[in-house]
Amino acid sequence: MLNLFVTYFVSQQNETQQKAIDDFLATQKQTPQIVSTFTEVLENRRPSKWSQLQKAIACCKEKNATLVIAELGTLTSKESFVNILLTAGINFYCCDQPFVNQDILDALYKHSQVQKKVHSRLIREGLGKTSAKSGNPNAAEVIGKVNKPKIDAAIVFAFLLQPIVAHYKQQGYSQRQMVKSLNEEGFTAPEGGKWVLSQLQKVLDRVKINEVVMQIKPIIESLLESNFTIGNIAEELNKQQIPALKKAHWDENQINKILTRLEQIKDIENINKFVLTLLPVIHEFKSRNYSAKQMLQHFEKHDIAINSAVCN
């Protein structure tokens, strides 16, 4: 009598995971047979459908086979993954965590959720203590100002990449194909070097927010002028059937994200206008061989606040 198994890999089917499967099969007293193999390729950072897992489970039910998971790893923290496996009603074995059964899997998931909450609380408390020790009660605000140039640059980069992304989507490219094409066509990643999938996904999120903001900007500004609250704005966008960012409907969190990006874009536009207005003056100063110090003195004399870096 054959022992029937369905093997399941996540992300990739590498030698280490395959060896773990082989070692497990070697321990079987009855002759083992793999009836099918499924590999889950994670295109998104937070998968929710787990299509290959569901196909593997269906195969197990059809063949009365045991599901062998090559590497469970940290998947115990993924709610959708755990729920699918717990409600499947099949036997499963995890090569890297052989002690895991349905009860333990459920317990591990609940434990990971508690740990996330504790971790989040500790970070908040740590930031509070750090601010107190540094004598700076506005540490978060200071950090935000320091990070602002980097954030602004990332937003502008997303605008620049937007038409390229649109072209790739028209061609039906997957995210991995986009990464491959960007590298082959010589487009450097946001911080230089080659693209990787995680970098592209972050940029795609920014592109998406930029697109939505520019599309609904007139509506948002009109609603704000009418003194609509955040909740009222969400209700109005849902009423007008305007697609939300990621969820099915607009909520206050998404509206706050849109308003933040709208302010960021306005800041970038204002900075660009200021620089474009100032450049001819700086060029004129340079033609007269003014030093950076002389330029700054001229601006200070006319009560124009400017950073010395602009004159260098």
Image: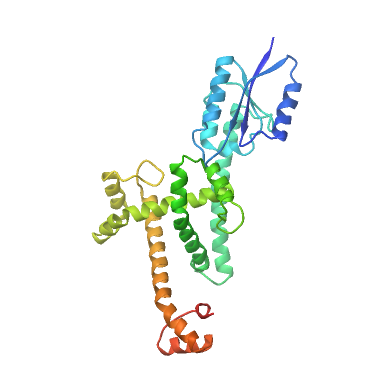
The vertical placement of 197 against 132, above or below, is above
Name, please, the residue furthest toward the left: 226
Which residue corresponds to the image point at 31% horizontal and 46% vertical from the top-left? 242
Residue 144 shows in this picture: no
Work out whether residue 75 can be spotted. yes
- Image quadrant assignment for residue 69: top right
Q: Position of residue 270 (x, y in %)?
A: 39, 70
Quadrant that contains the C terminus: bottom right
Residue drawn at the location 68% of the way across and 32% of the way down: 97
Q: Please tell me whether residue 32 is drawn above or below residue 143 in the rendered image.
A: above
Q: Quadrant of the N terminus?
A: top right
Residue 118, placed above or below residue 88: below
Q: Quadrant of residue 128?
A: bottom right
Q: Nearer the viewer, residue 259 or 157?
A: 157
- Nearer to me, 63 or 156: 156
Location of residue 178 in the rendering, given as x and y in whole percent from the top left corner:
53, 45
Residue 236, percent from left and from top = 27, 49
Q: Is residue 97 left or right of residue 167?
A: right
Q: Viewed as shown, does residue 241 lie left or right of 134? A: left
Residue 210, placed above or below residue 241: below
| Residue 23 position in % (x across, y down) | 75, 26
Tell me: 138 left or right of 240: right
